Image (tube, rainbow, N blue to C red):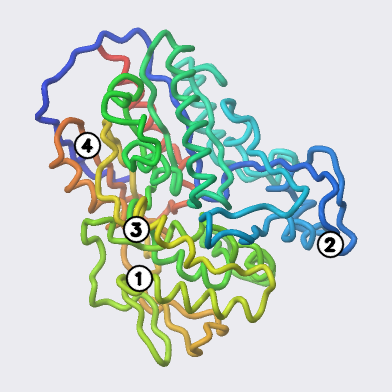
Amino acid sequence: MLRLPPLVVLATAVTIVVVHSAPDPVIILPAFAASVLDATLDKADKYRTCDTTSDNFTLYASAEQFTWSINCMINNMALRDDDLSATGCLNDRDGLTVTPRDFGGTAGVSVVNPDDWTAVQTVTFKSMIDNITAELHYEEGVSVRGAPYDFRRWGDACYTKTYFQSLKELVEDTYTKNNNRRVRFLCHSMGCPVGRAFLVSGIDPSVDAAWRAKYMAGLIAIGPPWAGSPQSIQSVIDGPVYPDLTPGWATAYIGEYIGKATSTWAGLMSLLPAQIGLGIYDESEPLVISPSKNFTINDMKTMLYHVSNVQVNYTHYSINRTDLWDYMSHNFFTLSAGPGVDLDCIYLVDVDTPSGLRFLKDDFTDTGTYISAVKGDGTVPMISAAKPLEAWKAEGGYNVTGYPLDLGGTLSHMGMPTSSDVIGIVLDVLRASNAP
């Protein structure tokens, strides 16, 4: 393994020395589609032969939902926009209640499909949790806790505010449970911009500099798409992309079906590439090429409007996601401030990562082909993870440390939380937090 030297920047503000007796407690913010979602049905609207009333069940993810129940799952996972233009809020189908599993525990962030056979489970933070509990004596539910979220609804005006209130309460409770020890976020992928927005967007005005100074020790970011990812464009247009899975009929089948639901998700839209006020992307370089128009970083809203109109023509689940644009643009896409707390940022620099996307049809129905690539982790380009660090270190008042990893192409985005190299860095950061 070649681990490039850390890029360490020391804040110029006055240093406050705190004597520690234990590592910082950790709250995990998982990636897009990495929170377990449970659901109940109570006299829900009728759809095919699907249940209209049920006890609690695993909506996402389970083998049952992805196989013989897939049509029912899609209907349950798709959001509605009945009053989106007026409120900025998306809704579940009538009679459906969706709840992220074990908020404040770890069962909702360890494995994506925990109710399936162990042999086919998709591990997210389980290996990380096992290591920090064994090596550093963390206690699940006390000093290491999860903050799973409904990744479908993240980014709309209602759910974002509600989630941030719950997250704030979890931070304060964790602080109290750990003898008034400040908390450190540990995030992967989309969980990282979620955490940054919580800390500095002002969506919850009570989360200010004084609150951060009292309750927050820092943020450890793994593969963070601070400035989004061009690969999300294809996911927005066609459905989810699975870069770590072998191409074939199964992944195409999953993508085609799930795409009917994902076309309604605010969370996927929140991952679109954005300048975040820092000029991350080349404004002259097309990210999407079609016969009649090329779309650059400055044309994302126009592209989204076009996609929304096209999708209305082939699935009744589609919504007009441009109604979400103003809220996301103000709170996420133009948010330039760093997290305001010590930041340790781990990212890959050695994997070809899709960038430019070409469509042969103006209605995007040919699914598109990537025609260019940049270095990154296969999903998040290096510039999205690393370039903001230079601006944030100039803010002062907190430390910024980058960990660029060149592992010879043996690791990619989704595998980062389970990587022994990444886990080793996280353990080192947490050990250092115990130093007097």
Name the amino acid type tagged 1: Ala
Task: Choose the circle earlier in sequence order: 4 or 3.
Answer: 3
Q: Amino acid at mark 3?
A: Gly
Task: Look at 42% across and 77% down and name the residue there.
Answer: 357
Q: Which mark is residue 148?
A: none
**Mark 1 or 4, closer to the camera:** 4
Eye-nearest disc, 4 or 3: 4
| Amino acid bearing label 2 | Tyr
Q: Residue at x 52, y 31 (%)?
A: 166
| Residue 208 drawn above or below residue 134 | below
Which of the two labelled residues, at mark 2 and mark 3, occupies the earlier sequence position?
2
Picture layout, residue 142 above or below residue 275? above
Read off the residue under disc 1.
373
- Indicate the secondary structure of the residue bearing disc 3: strand
Question: In the rendered image, which residue does mark 3 sit on?
Answer: 376
Q: Say which of marks 2 and 3 sits in front.
A: 2
Classify mark 2: residues with Cα within 10 Å, few (<14), some (14-19) or many (20+). Answer: few
| 374 sits left or right of 142 in the view | left
Location of the C terminus by quadrant is top left
- Of marks 2 and 4, the one in the foreground: 2
